[in-house]
Image (spheres, grey):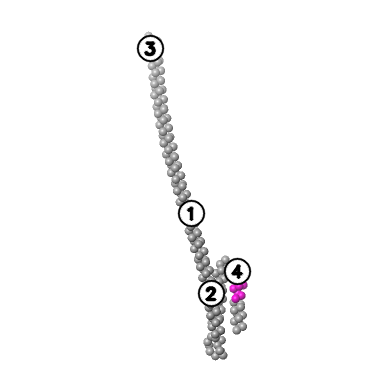
Amino acid sequence: MKKVFYLLMLSWLVPAVAALAQQPASPLPQLLAERRVLTQRYAAANAQRHSLFGLSNKPSKKDLQDVADALQGIVDQDEQIVAVLNQTAQRATTTAATLQNTGRDDRNLTAQRISELQNDLQNAQEREKQAAGRQRAVAADLAEAQQGQHVRDALIAGLALGCVGLLFWRQRR
């Protein structure tokens, strides 16, 4: 009986010392280690046979109570493990949702920026077309002015020749 008591006390100290030596980021490894200890405690309690007078190989009431306590400890530990796993799953879900929202926001921002750039491109193309139209209009005005200047120059040259011819004609006469 003393061996079992010391074994149980030692089994309770081992996880505590291990927890102090190594502080995990997640409580799950510690809970699993504690569950292993409880499982060992259950196995030890289940193996005990303290029947009346030691004549039969049946467990006593105390043995059965130790087994029930060990099983209850395992169930409680399993509930803690499930709670930690649920919290981890919730954090993972929240993180996934956050990443999905961030990705969606990034896609929306990218689509908006692409739309703005396309609008800027269309505006630049429209300004280029307007500038090309103004350039053609100025070129047409220049060609018309040059054509008008050629006509004036030809008219002036014709009048000058006419004046020179009239001058020669008057001098000959």
As displayed, is residue 98 above or below residue 17?
above
Q: Tell me the chief SS of the magenta region.
A: helix
Instruction: Name the N-terminal-most of marks 4 and 3.
Output: 4
Give the image quarter of residue 41. bottom right
Q: Which mark is residue 169?
A: 3
**Residue that mark 2 sits on:** 76
Q: Give the mark toward the camera: 1 or 2.
A: 2
Q: Position of residue 93 (x, y in %)?
A: 49, 63
Residue depicted at 60% across the width and 69% down the height: 22
Q: Residues within 10 Å of mark 3 (few under 14, many from 20)?
A: few
Instruction: Name the N-terminal-most of marks 3 and 2.
Output: 2
Q: In which quadrant of the rendered image does the N terminus lie? A: bottom right
* Mark 3, secondary structure of its residue: helix
Q: Which residue type carries mark 3?
A: Trp
Q: Give the mark toward the camera: 3 or 2.
A: 2
Relative to 119, 34 lies left or right? right
Q: CA distance from mark 3 to mark 2?
A: 136 Å
Q: Which mark is residue 22?
A: 4
Instruction: Name the N-terminal-most of marks 3 and 1.
Output: 1
Q: Give the mark toward the camera: 1 or 4.
A: 1
Q: Position of residue 6 (x, y in %)?
A: 61, 80
Between residue 126 and residue 153, name the one nearer to us. Answer: 126
Asked if the residue under mark 1 is in contact with the one under mark 3, i.e. CB atoms within 8 Å, the reply is no
Q: Which residues are magenta?
A: 12-22
Q: Which residue type carries mark 4?
A: Gln
* Mark 2, secondary structure of its residue: helix
Q: CA distance from mark 3 to mark 1?
A: 92 Å
